[in-house]
Amino acid sequence: MTDAISQDLDQFAGAYQPGALYALDNELILNWYPHRVLDQAKGGSLLELGVGHGYATRILNGHFERHVIVDGSGAVIEQFKAQNPDLSLEMVESYFETFDTEERFDTICMGFVLEHVDDPADILTRFRRFLAPGGSIFVTVPNAESMHRRAATRPGSCPTSSPSAKATCSSATSGSSRLAA
């Protein structure tokens, strides 16, 4: 990945520091959904999209024979590695849209990432190729019907002129602290 591309996402690394704007919301939500995954996953290998705050990663780690994370920000990856040196996992710096591998995974976890990409359906289709036979994909996204999401999408209150403007507005109003580039 080129330095210029990585810097696009690196500018948001501060959102993953303790005390960031949505830290409490994220802690509550992000500690909940990985336990749901563990209740239903069959072990084996895990491909996780995005490390973000690392709540889910820390919970999921150790429950799979192999754990691979794809994240588009080198700064977020380095920050996570520094804060979690003892975890057993592989981190790959790549945009989801360009990630490729011959490996097939028993579990793929997309926790609060699809709202940050231009074409969520493309990501779902793309990553289905990396799913092992009999495997499962777990997807978690913010609630589009939440009160603050509905308030922010009243006519005229959210820019709709471009996909990136929509993604940024969606991210800023969804309760998620990872903003679209």
Image (cartoon, rainbow, N blue to C red):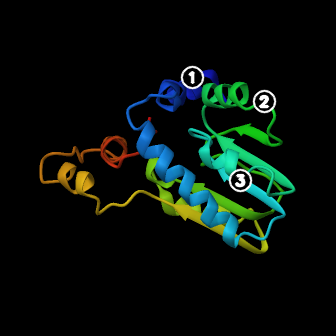
- The residue that label 3 is drawn on is 60
Secondary structure state at the residue bearing disc 3: helix
User: Image check: 127 left or right of 135?
Assistant: left
Q: Amino acid at mark 2?
A: Pro
Secondary structure state at the residue bearing disc 2: loop
- The residue that label 2 is drawn on is 85
Q: Position of residue 144 (x, y in %)?
A: 33, 60
Mark 1, Cα crowd under 10 Å, few <14 / some 14-19 / many 20+, is: few
Mark 3, Cα crowd under 10 Å, few <14 / some 14-19 / many 20+, is: some
Q: Are marks 1 and 2 in contact (CB under 8 Å)?
A: no
Q: Position of residue 37 (x, y in %)?
A: 64, 65
Is residue 29 something one can see in this rendering? yes
Residue found at x 65% / y 46%: 98
- Residue 4 is marked as 1
User: Closer to us: mark 1 or mark 2?
Assistant: 2
Secondary structure state at the residue bearing disc 1: helix
Q: Amino acid at mark 1?
A: Ala
